[in-house]
Amino acid sequence: MSGTANVIVSTPPAISSFTPSPAICEFSVATYSVTATGTSPTYQWYVNDGTGFAATTDGGTYIGSTTTTLQILSTVRTMNGYKYHVVVSGCATNVQSTDAVFTVNTRPEVTLNPSDSTICLGNNATMSADATGTALTWQWWVNKGAGFVVVTDDGIHFSGSTTKTLTITNALATYNTGYLKQKFPEPVLPQPLQVLEDFQSLIRRR
């Protein structure tokens, strides 16, 4: 009497690649992913919010906590600096990815609105705005009655068109009832052209 038996050799897990999320704006979706080899590996993602690493769980903030891809759905500015890694398990072996620091950029929030100005013909005026946020840029626009166009420094009448404060020198009669506004682009996007806040100030001649 004889018989046969199969020997199955399982391969322990090994991480091939680990892709952390790039920096994102708050309220956007972030994605972390991992690829691994081995026999039937399992996955668990972990987060450190400053109190030590703990396993993520699906629901509300996270999706894919035990898969190759973790998605963070509710990103807020308080999550900036959180650390994430994944543990891949199999064949009585655990392998861990490197820790990845999560960067959440904040959207602009206005702290100063421009004020209306009434000036005499040929006089000077300044318009100021301010905001908090990550990597803000500034651009003033003007509407003289035919729609808003970008203000550019011309060395004569306008300066500071890409700063917080626009200076108008030797105001012309054509500036009467002209509107100015400041645009705050959204940070860290490939095409930062979305207007988040618009402000208008009226220049009058007297």
Image (cartoon, helix red, strand yellow):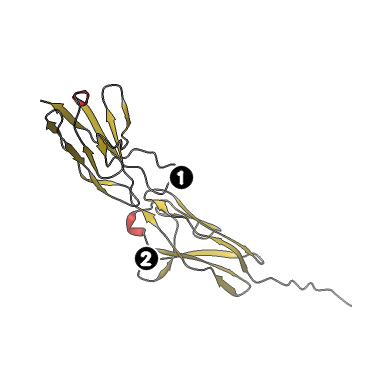
Numbered circle sitting on residue 190: 1
**Alpha carbon of mark 2 to alpha carbon of mark 1: how far?**
28 Å
Q: Along the line of sight, which residue is nearer the eye, 109 or 164?
A: 164
Where is residue 148, by image quadrant? top left
User: Taking 144 as reference, is 71 left or right?
Assistant: right
Crowding near pointer 2: few (<14 within 10 Å), some, many (20+)? Answer: some
How many marks the image carries: the answer is 2
SS class, disc 2: loop
Residue 38 coordinates in the image, percent (x, y):
66, 67
Q: Along the line of sight, which residue is nearer the eye, 175 or 83?
A: 175
Q: Is residue 114 visible?
A: no
The residue indicated by pointer 2 is 49
Three-letter amino acid code at the position of disc 2: Asp
Where is residue 138, by image quadrant? top left
Q: Residue at x 26, y 25 (%)?
A: 144
Residue 86 coordinates in the image, percent (x, y):
51, 65
Q: Earlier in the sequence, mark 2 or mark 1?
A: 2
User: Taking 145 as reference, is 46 left or right?
Assistant: right
Q: Is residue 160 visible?
A: yes
Crowding near pointer 1: few (<14 within 10 Å), some, many (20+)? Answer: few
SS class, disc 1: loop
Three-letter amino acid code at the position of disc 1: Pro
